[in-house]
Image (spheres, helix red, strand yellow):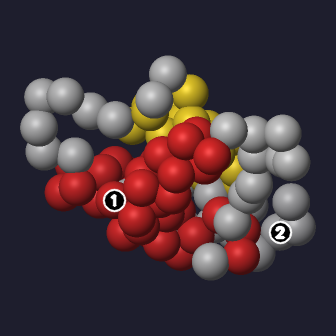
Amino acid sequence: MGLFDQMFGSGAAVQRQQRFNELKVKYQSVLNAMEHEQVKLQNLHVEDNKLFIKGTVSSEDARDKIWNQIKLVDTGSETDLSCDISVDQTRLAGGSW
């Protein structure tokens, strides 16, 4: 998965890594949508037993596509995802970032 394969470091607890892996599997389609929409990630980790994602995209349309995918996966009232995707108007399609 490249961009999303982040590790916690050598001192991290095995349980935390396992939780991260569980959440990555659950939200794989969301992570795929984020990669497709070229999200510039700032954070991807487990925080408060939830998958925490923070990043930016270049358009509201891209953000909406990601949120639509989140809604397909996260249908219950109890969520295990905290996601903050903002639109950065300065990121132009095809530009370097």
Residue at which label 1 appears: 26
**Residue closest to the eye, 82 or 10:** 10
Residue 69 in the image, given as x and y percentages of width and height:
29, 59
Asked whether, in this view, residue 10 is left or right of residue 25, the answer is: right
Q: Secondary structure at mark 1?
A: helix
Label 1 Cα neighbours within 10 Å, binned few <14 / some 14-19 / many ≥20: some
Q: Residue at the location (62% across, 77% down)?
A: 1
Q: Residue at the location (42% across, 52% down)?
A: 23
Residue 51 in the image, given as x and y percentages of width and height:
48, 40
Separation of residues labelled 1 and 2 (CA atoms) = 31 Å
Residue 39 in the image, given as x and y percentages of width and height:
63, 58
The image's mark for residue 6 is none
Asked whether, in this view, residue 24 is left or right of residue 13, the answer is: left
Q: Quadrant of residue 37?
A: bottom right
Asked whether, in this view, residue 52 is left or right of residue 30, the answer is: right
- Outermost residue toward the left in this view: 76
Which quarter of the figure is the C terminus placed in? bottom right
**Residue closest to the eye, 91 or 23:** 23
Label 2 Cα neighbours within 10 Å, binned few <14 / some 14-19 / many ≥20: few
The image's mark for residue 95 is 2
Q: Secondary structure at mark 2?
A: loop
Q: Amino acid at mark 2?
A: Gly
- Outermost residue toward the front in this view: 14
Question: Is residue 24 depicted above or below 47 in this figure?
Answer: below
Q: Residue at the location (84% across, 47% down)?
A: 9
Label located before the other in sequence (1 or 2) = 1
Q: Amino acid at mark 1?
A: Lys
Asked whether, in this view, residue 65 is left or right of residue 86, the answer is: left
Q: Is residue 55 visible?
A: no
Q: Residue at the location (34% across, 59% down)?
A: 26
Question: Which is more foreground, mark 1 or mark 2?
Answer: 1
